[in-house]
Amino acid sequence: MSKNLITFIIVFFSIIAYSQNVTISGNNSDYIGDSITFYTYNDLICKTEIPIAACNVDKAGNFSFNIQTENTIFIYAYLGIYKAEMYIEPNKNYTITLPAKKEKEGKDILNPYFNYTDVLIGIAESNKYELNTLIRSFDFFYDDYLSINFNKIRQGLDNKLDSFIFGIKRYFKPVDHQYFKDYMKYKLNYLDYLSNHKDYKYITQYFFKNQPILYHNVAYMEFFNNLYKDFFFEFGNSKNGKKIKEDIVLAKSPKAIQKTMDLEVAFSDKTLNNMIILKGLHDAFIFNIPNLYHYPKAQLNQTLDSMIILSTIPEQKLIAKDIKSKFNDKPLVYGKHLPDITLLNQDSIETKLTSFQDKYVYISLTMTNCVPCQRDMLLIKKYKEKYKRTIEFVTIVINEDFETMTNFIKKNKYDWTFLHYGLKKDINKILEVEAIPKYILIDPYGRIILPSAPPPGEKFIVAFRKILKNAK
């Protein structure tokens, strides 16, 4: 039985006494004989995917799901090339329309990083005040404005922003749907945050402190996750937060962290602070750079254990458990040796990842059609010459056939080691790749230094120089 299924069963039976039934049904002959599964996120910090309902489409194309939930939640289903999405509310029935079936191509079926096309699930007999309709209408205006004006907003030069916010608030003023009003509020608050360049303490004081924590509201949690990204690093470098590392590494105590946070007026809301601490612990497992920003895994886990035991809020207890599950029992751990993986290089020669010796190894997992990956490879091309005495650059291509990879290398005149994932299709699981590009830094002895290294850029340079300095 999979861990996700076990998690689903535990969560399902823990809430069933309090939750309400939601029915989703419809008909689409394209899916006759198929099994359709709806998923949601167990929490919106870890975003652990769990199944919540499944059914087989009958011979007439009919399907029906029953979902138990006490909250309005975001759900989705993978249908061929599509990720079909919608929001559901407790005690409601939905008749839905699925997109016309379009299967993945052969090469896409084997690609663990296939980029699904997001589609909105159609809802029969919907009206302008139905939640999905409201969110789609708002997002249409919001996303269009943000995409056109993002740079101006970021630079504080958008003199039309206040008019846009006023106008969209007026447009949706008749709406009396709490989830939507909160959704719009935090989407617009995020625009204000981008435009005015206020720091996280100011935003905490005026947007989050003494406000309800909306654990299931997508817009609230998106803003929350952006605002408190790498919180221990940011707060730890402030005047009042210098003790935060000691609170974790030595005290291993949420209460000690809380006491340090109390030095800032913004952090006087204890319930919110616990959420911020959970976000900080989550990110500390990811952005964990020895000698620069390093929290030993054991201490992070002990702090999490305390959060699990002491928390009186079910949602926060669940998040703490999800964080612990997400980052434990994994092969990529600081100090361990890299797994012994054999792949074909660009010359069709079998090459072991462990064969690179005497230099640091900067491994990138990438796709040739990924724009951020392409941008990063241009930097690697520059770094290769600058750091040729100390770093071996190795790029693993995971989404194309072998010939596409070699043509890509020739076209761009890249002259470092490229490996194709074809001999190890499950490399994403072995190397814990949740998104691409992914970077790993290995020391000259084959030991993992940074399981999730920074991408090429200033953060990587700072981290690597620090590592070299402390290695002497």
Image: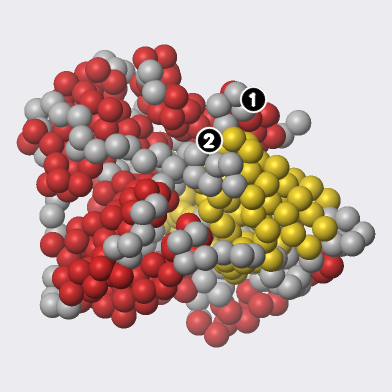
Regarding residue 223, the answer to whether it shows in the image is yes
**Disc 2 residue crowd, few under 14, some 14–19, many 20+, Cα 10 Å:** some
Foreground residue among 294 and 346: 294
Measured in 3D between alpha carbons, the distance from the residue under mark 2 to the one under mark 1, in whole angstroms, is 13 Å
In the figure, 261 relative to 418: above or below? Answer: above
Closer to us: mark 2 or mark 1? 2
Q: Amino acid at mark 1?
A: Phe
Regarding residue 396, the answer to whether it shows in the image is no
Q: Secondary structure at mark 2?
A: loop
Q: Position of residue 204 (x, y in %)?
A: 18, 43
Quadrant of the image occupied by residue 78: bottom right
Q: Which residue ends up furthest to the bottom in the rendered image?
A: 411
Quadrant of the image occupied by residue 257: top left
Q: Secondary structure at mark 1?
A: helix
Quadrant of the image occupied by residue 100: bottom right
Residue depicted at 84% across the width and 67% down the height: 29
In the figure, 183 relative to 338: above or below? Answer: below
Q: Position of residue 155 (x, y in %)?
A: 16, 71
Residue depicted at 46% across the width and 54% down the height: 439
Foreground residue among 82 and 186: 186
Residue identified by numbered label 1: 13
> Where's the C terminus, which quadrant?
top left
- Left or right, 316 with respect to 395, comes to left
Q: Position of residue 219 (x, y in %)?
A: 37, 53
Residue identified by numbered label 2: 70
Q: How is the structure coloured here?
A: secondary structure
Instruction: Tell me which label, 2 or 1, sits earlier in the chain.
Output: 1
- Left or right, 293 with respect to 410, comes to left
Residue depicted at 14% across the width and 50% down the height: 199
> Where's the N terminus, which quadrant?
top right
Q: Amino acid at mark 2?
A: Glu
Q: Position of residue 363 (x, y in %)?
A: 50, 55
